Amino acid sequence: MKTFLALDLGGTKLLIGELDQSGKILRHKRYVANYANQREAVELIKRSLDDYIATEGWVDQDLPVAMGVGLVGRVDPCQGIWLQIDPRRTDPIPLSKELSEIYGMPVFIDNDVKSATQAIRRFELKSDNFVYINVGTGIAAGIIAGGKLIRGSHFNASEVGHNAVGVDLGITCACGRKDCVEMIAAGIGIDYCARMLAPEFQTKLNIPEGARVDVEEVFTLSREGDPLCVELVKNASQALAGLIMNLVRVVDPDTVVLGGGVIADGYLHGQALVKLNPTTIRFVTGGVVLTGLHPDLIGLIGAGAVAMNNYDKIDEAQYNHCSLGE
Ligand SMILES: [Zn+2]
């Protein structure tokens, strides 16, 4: 049986799994991810792979035919180079080459949200024009236009979290701009806004020192009419609707797909849907929908899709041939 090894490195967790060609996860294991920079992350990746192979092994006797790796930050998928996680500092690492030499299989790498976008296209939505928006700790997108994943001149396209979207709260984002949607509608944004607005609104919300507010709790309290949480959800859903409508005007997609930990339970999705202007989204015939791929596993399935998309193109032993994420 032909299988693919997938590795998904997030901010706090690392998943490794083996998938079949239909995208089904045959087995997988979760690791705690603790790293301060790319070098530490690479060591963590190798340690985790060694452990996975020792403890889980392969489903079949044969090695997986290729490995896909989803990473935070900028990635050059053609050269297999992980460029950056810290926006202030680039530290290019030839990760594909390093890992393929150690583990004896072709290795393909990509950004995590762009990987998830490939999973959606390969397993869920046969569309040449769609937008995937990941709403998690931060916000980023994957844009498929004319059948191609948009990457930009520095592999930095679709960082849509850093757009102002018509909700003016006077927040200065770390990127230098004001009122970026990420600072209002993502996990870090809801936390930031809760602290900023808490003096103005009554609330039962627990705002802990040294940890982020629990978004699930914000949504539960919002449903109960808690004044602060109602305000947070109003701002977040308005900002998200603004982002969706901006992207629709730029890309003209047939579908907008949403995913990520903050949106997965459907509450913020529902709140944003009612704020969409029907005229703006009239050509979005596939709708503004939640992905059916599990929020905890979409990154792993995405890494698998990266392996498969690239493996499909190396049948003439073009080891480094790059599909550019189709
Ligand atoms: Zn920003």
Image (tube, rainbow, N blue to C red):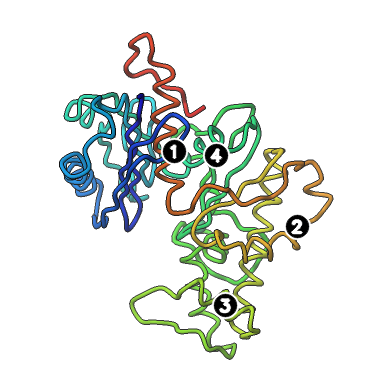
Q: Residue furthest top?
A: 316
What residue is disc 2 on?
A: 276
- The answer to which image quadrant residue 95 occupies is top left
What is the three-letter code of the residue carrying label 2?
A: Leu
In the displayed structure image, the side of residue 278 where residue 213 appears, left or right: left
| Measured Cα–Cα span from mark 3 to mark 2 | 23 Å
Which is more N-terminal, label 4 or label 3?
4
Q: Which residue is found at the position 41% from the left and 22% from the top?
A: 322
Q: Position of residue 158 (x, y in %)?
A: 54, 43
* Disc 1 to disc 4, C-alpha distance: 13 Å
Question: Are the residues flagged by discs 3 and 4 in contact, CB closer than 8 Å?
Answer: no
Name the front one of labels 3 and 1.
1
Q: Which residue is mark 3?
A: 220
- Residue designated by label 1: 24
Whole-percent x and y of residue 18? 33, 37
Q: CA distance from mark 3 to mark 1?
A: 33 Å
Q: Are marks 3 and 2 in contact (CB under 8 Å)?
A: no
Q: Position of residue 155 (x, y in %)?
A: 44, 36
Instruction: Kindly report which numbered mark, 3 or 2, lies closer to the viewer in this rendering.
Output: 3
